[in-house]
Amino acid sequence: MLPDYEDFRLRADAVRQRISSACIGAGRDPAGVELLAVTKFFPAEAVAYAARYGLRAVGENRVQEAAEKRPLAPPGIAWELIGHLQSNKARLAAGLFDRIDSVDSEKLLVLLDRAASELGKKLPVLLQVNSGHDPAKSGVEPEESDALLAKALSLPNIRVEGLMAIAPLSEDPDVARRAFASLREIRDHLASSHGVALPVLSMGMSGDLEAAIREGSTLVRVGSALFGARV
Ligand SMILES: *Cc1c(COP(=O)(O)O)cnc(C)c1O
């Protein structure tokens, strides 16, 4: 159940505090890490909370859910897709979202480029990389990331802003840390070999945002720490 706004505000302040402490511990400026509120499974009111709190964007993991919710939510906040996108929903997603953070195939890139062209927009994306080699997670394997970026850079209606990863679920915190470090190394390598910036590194969630920030995250995707358990 969605908490009331006051409860949400306290939770959001606490998450911000965690982000700041992690940044200070890592010698980073807290302004360099953005909080993306993950509103999946929660009603449109959760999006209104995020907007009222002053967040730039919310993340949703399913196209259909976002399509139903967006008309009910206030304007003035950006929507990002953070879950796997099926080809047959590419066109709908290109119109609905302000950025697709989970692009994981060349086929999808081509479909999104075509849809963006028809919509007369340049669509921002992140490329999702399975940097933790997790068989259960989507994202391209690190070895395929170079070809995926090359494809994205060749498309006129796509703008690649960075990379995203989800750490494998593990009891061992080192597993997540290695996946985060690996995403940063992949980003550094791709940025220099292609001569592009790739400033956004989307990694870290409620349970592991400190480790992600230590390894260079610029965008943490936080759901349960803001809104409570998804039931
Ligand atoms: C649900 C989800 C999150 C948020 O997870 P919490 O543990 O609730 O913070 C982050 N990223 C992705 C891709 C998700 O699907």
Image: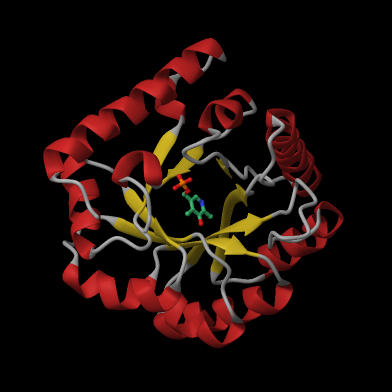
Q: Farthest residue in the right direction?
A: 143
* Residue 209, horizontal then vertical, whole percent: 52, 32
**Residue 14, placed above or below residue 90:** above
* Residue 125, horizontal then vertical, whole percent: 54, 60
* Residue 56, horizontal then vertical, whole percent: 31, 46
Question: For this view, does 37 lie left or right of residue 150?
Answer: left
Quarter assignment of residue 126: bottom right
Q: Going 75% across and 47% down the picture, which residue do you hit?
A: 131
The number of callouts visible is 0
**Residue 90, placed above or below residue 105:** below
**Residue 16, placed above or below residue 196:** above
Quarter assignment of residue 192: top right
Question: For this view, does 79 lie left or right of residue 203?
Answer: left
> Which quadrant is home to the C terminus?
bottom left
Quarter assignment of residue 127: bottom right
Q: Going 41% across and 36% down the picture, which residue do you hit?
A: 34
Q: Going 30% across and 46% down the picture, which residue do you hit?
A: 227
**Residue 87, placed above or below residue 3:** below
Question: For this view, does 225 lie left or right of residue 44?
Answer: right
> Which quadrant is home to the N terminus?
bottom left
State how the image is colored.
Answer: secondary structure
* Residue 186, horizontal then vertical, whole percent: 77, 42
